Amino acid sequence: MKSRLSIPGLSRRTFLGVTAGAALAPVLGSLAADESTESSVKEAIIDIHQHTNYSGRSDHHLIAHQEALGITTTVLLPAGSLYGLDAQCGGNRTVVELTRRHPDKFVYFGNEVANLPNAVSVIAPMLRAGARGIGEQKFKVACDSREIEAIAALAKEFNVPVLMHFQHEVYNTGIERFHKTLEKFPEVNFIGHAQTWWGNIDRNHDQTSMYPNGPVSVGGITDRLLADYPNMFGDLSAGSGLNSMIRDEDHARGFLDRHQDKLLYGSDCNDSLGRGPGCLGAQILAAVRRLAPNDEARRKILHRNAKRLLKL
């Protein structure tokens, strides 16, 4: 039975290097992609969250970054026609063009600012042309608004997921009410991401805190949404996803275990090297590999769940 949610009474790029370092193990070498044995074959990794022109990064450096991480398929999330997702990210045209040049490396989503009157008419042709989902939806609307309902209805029509950036009082606000959207659109898969999504693994989360520290109390909004709603998934990317794992590694082991069918690896990293302390993607990979309860769960998080969700 689905429970009603209630809560008790900045930029992610500034997070680089703050929680990394000694707490993180080095990125491990390539693991086997074969489901039955560990061998020298490279492990499949789907990166659910990357951007073109991220903070001005070139396509060449994006490709080099993903290759250094060992990514086999990258999902490109475009900005809408305004704001550039706060990071100068490229729009719909740029993700389509890069995917056409490298169809073996990339797939893409379609996107538009949710509260623009032409949002649905902009996204729909991209879905017809092969976009695998909608997002990153990172706009100043409520998460249970008419605008998000229109996006969800479009996703239902095309049977694709919606990736949403939750940030308290800024983007997709009112996460404590998001269960209403999940219940209204049970056929639509939603992927949660960002500071307020990952802060709410803790039932005692202070909604104003973007990168909370310290032990996690089980049973926060995010934990319950993942447990109670088959159409809710989680994107482990960015400083917020990394922080959710390394702030309390004992909790993270249990969280990755019980939600292993719902979690997706993503980098959301504007680094150009794909290694070292400045690369969130490498740090998140290391954390998943270290904290996943077993090889099967690791494979689900790194590629199987995304493959199933995006029909790759």
Image (spheres, rainbow, N blue to C red):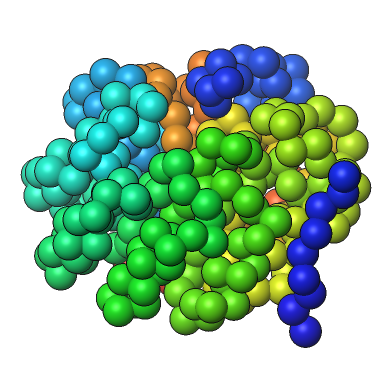
- Res 90 seen here: yes
User: For the C terminus, which image quadrant?
Assistant: bottom left
Question: In the picture provided, is 222 more to the left or to the right than 103?
Answer: right
Q: Residue at x 53, y 56 (%)?
A: 143
Q: In the rendered image, which quarter is residue 242 located in?
A: top right
User: For the N terminus, which image quadrant?
Assistant: bottom right
- Res 302 seen here: no
Q: Residue at x 69, y 64 (%)?
A: 225
Vertical comparison of 44 with 296: above or below: above
Q: Residue furthest bottom?
A: 1
Question: Which one is in front, 54 or 288?
Answer: 54
Residue 169 image point, x, y percent: 60, 38
Residue 102 image point, x, y percent: 15, 46
Q: In the rendered image, which quarter is residue 257 located in?
A: bottom right
Residue 288 image point, x, y percent: 64, 44
Question: Which one is in front, 226 or 119?
Answer: 119
Q: Residue at x 20, y 56 (%)?
A: 118
Question: In the picture provided, is 90 more to the left or to the right than 153?
Answer: left
Q: Residue at x 34, y 52 (%)?
A: 114
Vertical comparison of 12 with 240: above or below: above
Question: In the picture provided, is 251 more to the left or to the right than 169?
Answer: right
Residue 243 image point, x, y percent: 69, 33
Question: Which one is in front, 201 or 70?
Answer: 201
